[in-house]
Image (tube, helix red, strand yellow):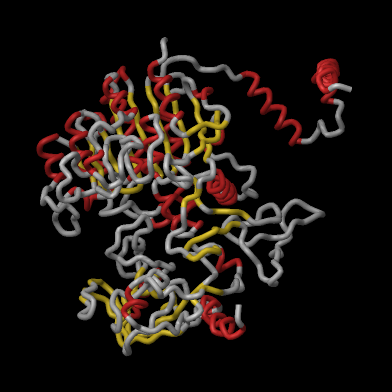
Amino acid sequence: MHRRHLLMTLPFLAAPALVRAAPGDADAPIKVRDLYTRARGFSDLAQARDGRRISVSGYMAPPLKAQSRFFVLTGRPMAVCPFCESDAEWIEDILPVQTKRIVDPVYYTVGIAARGVLNLGSFTDPETGFVGQMRLTDASFDN
Amino acid sequence: MSLKPYLAASALALAATGATAQTDLPQASSEWFAAAQDTVAQALQRQPNTGRALNVVLMISDGNGVGTNYASRLFQGQQTGGFGDEFVQSHESFPHLALVKTYNVNAQTPDSAGTGTAMMAGVKTKAGIIGVNENVVRGDCATLDGNTVTPISRIAVDMGKASGIVSTARITHATPASAYAQTVDRNFEAHVPEGCESQTDIAQQLIEAMESGLIHVAMGGGMRNFHAGEGGRREDGRDLIAYAQDELGAQFASDMASFKAVDPASGAPILGLFESSHMMYEADREDEPSLAEMTAAAIAALQAAGGDNGFFLQVEAGRVDHANHGGNLARVVRDQQAFADAVAMADEMTDDADTLIVVTADHEHAIAFNGYCGRGSDILGLCMGIDGAGVAHTGEPNTAEDGLAYTVAGYLNGAGSILVPEAAGEADTSATNASVEVGAAEGAVPVFSGSRPALSQEQATDIDYLQQALIPMSSETHSGEDVAVYAKGPWAHLFDGTLEQNVIFHVMHHAMTADR
């Protein structure tokens, strides 16, 4: 591998360690799964953070539409689109993210942290038509 | 010295020394020695059961090959506080087993449609097709006629037995469908292509099977394939659930409350559809029955319906396979644990004297195991060092030549790949790159590279962790490696050696039809 490529790749590979929440650190990224109860309702944490800016670690599913301000944050790397038929179905630990800027796609296995305002409640993303019950708005992300 | 006289002399010497001499061995006081002697003593007591099988239960853990099964054994053992290796899963206590060659006629690496047909109908066929022979061209409805095969469930029903299927996958998925469907494509779950006149879709075939009496109990996921309402996939607009209830008198369950309300002894068929698609992973299960609970309900219903004629039941742990596809071993082993619980339930509810229980997998996955790990290394976590002065591992992770720790288990391919596109994070936002999986577009295949990240035990044992893999793929693949078949009950001793997968049907058939 070329050194240039190594330097480009390493920050992404190190990302999961960077985005791991530290115990007791209220501003540290939480996991997507922490926002849901086992019965797929909103968790206490999600309800407590509704309307507040939070940071959530996960992975960027391949964007549904190019040049959009929307992506889906997944709890595990997930390459398939939610409308595709596959043995590996769309997982439940997802968080729709509406971003400030047009999304610059990150490969779906590279850990990222998305930061934005948590909004609980039904919505339809105007660009993609994606329907969800929870989202981050005014969001940005880093890896 | 020629070989044969030497062997004869050795045999004589062994016979002369006998068991008495064994107790004089310095290792004779070892618990390992005593346990192994017990094992041999039990084997010497074993008598083949040559009676006719009143009941046959075929239990398939989808994707639970020998390697995956090994991981699950260690997980369950470690959950109970042991090192893991010494643990015995329910099916591993069965007295008879064989290795099974799982390939499809046209696929070195099989899929569940071809393997399901092999087990249920006694002939190998192509990948992707169900209840039909190898003359069928996948997806071509014109090739169906004259090429269908008869499943063991049909033979059982024709003998007066009751028949049922239970799965944690969609009940229209390949393995359960092999009990009732004949289709040129496994994906025809809710509709067939325009112009396809030779068959109906798989969901429709299940309802037809309930109507004809072929299937008395069907429980699993896949509700979307049975209706055209919100979230439904039916293009013909039919509501097959309402039809089953109104026209067939079926008891319908979709959650724990309605599952508990089902009366197995009523004689009415049972349709349980607990999710729109697959049922939840065991790790995430909520308001759905476990595989063991569904197995118990199915056996009770089939015992009532079959009466003195007995029953046939196929049980599938469908999501062991899916978690493997996801490269997420933490969910694999928990679903396999649920499967082992279902095996124990089936064993408990039936009599070895008249019930053949066959436990197997349809195929293995691209899972592999690292070394050299000390005893008690978490099967989901890091490979710890071997302690030359003790038994338990050292508590220090082994490291590779990159200086980094590694997990006990890994995958050859999948979403856990350490390789990423070299332009990762800086990809352009053209439609090509943004709307499809990277590398899928013609002429847009990036170079993949990478190295292993540092890994802590906490990260590796997280429920959502994906074990490191090599080849980047969105879905980890099956492998063609052998699986095992474990059996007990009438004619279980016929499972021996290394078998073609379609032999499973023939042993079940022989057991069901043997002269009393």
- Looking at the picture, how far across and down is residue B318, in whole percent? 39, 47
The answer to whether residue B338 of the structure is visible from this angle is no
Tell me what residue is drawn at x 38 percent, y 41 percent.
B126
Q: Could you tell whether B482 is left or right of B262 in the image?
A: right
Question: Compared to B38, does B228 lie above or below?
Answer: below
Question: Compared to A49, does B75 lie above or below?
Answer: above
Most distant residue in the right direction = B1
Question: Compared to B144, does B276 lie above or below?
Answer: below
Tell me what residue is drawn at x 36 percent, y 41 percent.
B175
The quadrant of the picture occupied by the N terminus of chain B is top right
State which quadrant residue B441 falls in.
Answer: bottom left
The one nearer the camera, B149 or B456, is B149
The one nearer the camera, B101 or B95, is B101
The answer to whether residue B47 of the structure is visible from this angle is yes
Tell me what residue is drawn at x 25 percent, y 54 percent.
B276
Question: Compared to B60, does A140 lie above or below?
Answer: below
The quadrant of the picture occupied by the C terminus of chain B is top left
Most distant residue in the top direction = B516
Q: Could you tell whether B280 is left or right of B66 in the image?
A: left
- Looking at the picture, how far across and down is residue B223, in whole percent? 23, 50
Tell me what residue is drawn at x 29 percent, y 41 percent.
B219
- Looking at the picture, how far across and down is residue B322, in whole percent? 41, 54
State which quadrant residue A127 falls in.
Answer: bottom left
Q: Could you tell whether B160 is left or right of B194 in the image?
A: right
